[in-house]
Amino acid sequence: MLIVEAQPKSISAEKYRVLRTNIQYSSIDKEIRRIVVTSAEPGEGKSTTAGNLALAFSQDNKKVLLIDCDLRKPSVHKKFKLSNTLGLSDVIINKEKIQEAIQERNENLDVLSAGKLPPNPSELLGSVTMDKLLEYFETIYDVIILDSPPLHAVTDAQILSKKSDGLVLVVRAERTKKDSVLAAKALLEKVNAPILGVVLNGGESTKEKYYYYYGH
Ligand SMILES: Nc1ncnc2c1ncn2[C@@H]1O[C@H](COP(=O)(O)OP(=O)(O)O)[C@@H](O)[C@H]1O
Ligand SMILES: [Mg+2]
């Protein structure tokens, strides 16, 4: 269960709304509509952040689509207790499945789960069909949040970052090693990823379970 939905009045939920506002104000000339959430390693809180951020945008009356682009270890459908019978991979292969695959979470938030695990995730994410899909989604949604696999495992997040307006790097407090974060940053800079900032996930300095810092 995601905190923004379960406890919208909590301090943690408020932090996600601050993150949302920071993203909205981070670019003056270009509206940030496609946002990639990634991290150096598995388990740092990418999917948790992507889900809560999507909810925070939906509470701001934005039409939001959350897409699980972690076609290797998908988890968005689990966090939202949704089905993953049909999802992004299926839609890339067969566009006719779009309407069937999109699941409504609330009146402003739709979710596209990952779908069947494909043998070639990077190829699917880097395809022209994926570009076309994102262009199509932009005609319907204000904000598209892309959850992704970790940077150190595969090139998927780098591929996605090139298709996005902004990228959020999640770092797990007291766990992610500094070298790992710096290596992730280097990978992103190599492809000129539009890094918006870093989310520090799970600091223990507060009574709340989740703590977020946002900035460069
Ligand atoms: N701040 C946090 N405090 C406690 N547990 C967390 C926190 N952030 C994430 N988790 C838990 O850690 C696990 C990994 O988080 P997840 O968002 O799935 O990571 P990723 O997508 O980066 O692999 C999940 O079980 C999630 O519920
Ligand atoms: Mg994940």
Image (cartoon, rainbow, N blue to C red):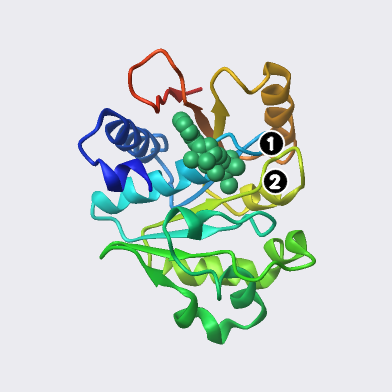
Q: Give the residue furthest to the bottom.
A: 96
Give above or below for 163 relative to 199. Answer: below
Whether label 1 touches label 2, CB < 8 Å:
yes
Q: Amino acid at mark 2?
A: Gln
Q: Residue at x 55, y 54 (%)?
A: 75
**Would you say residue 168 is visible in this rendering?**
no
Residue 29: percent from the left, percent from the top? 41, 42
Q: Give the residue furthest to the top.
A: 205
Crowding at mark 2 (Cα within 10 Å: few <14, some 14-19, many 20+): many
Residue 181: percent from the left, percent from the top? 67, 25
Q: Earlier in the sequence, mark 1 or mark 2?
A: 2
Image disc number at residue 188 = 1
Q: Residue at x 28, y 63 (%)?
A: 106
Q: Amino acid at mark 1?
A: Leu
Q: Residue at x 70, y 22 (%)?
A: 182
Q: Is mark 2 within 8 Å of ligand 1?
A: no
* SS at badge 1: helix
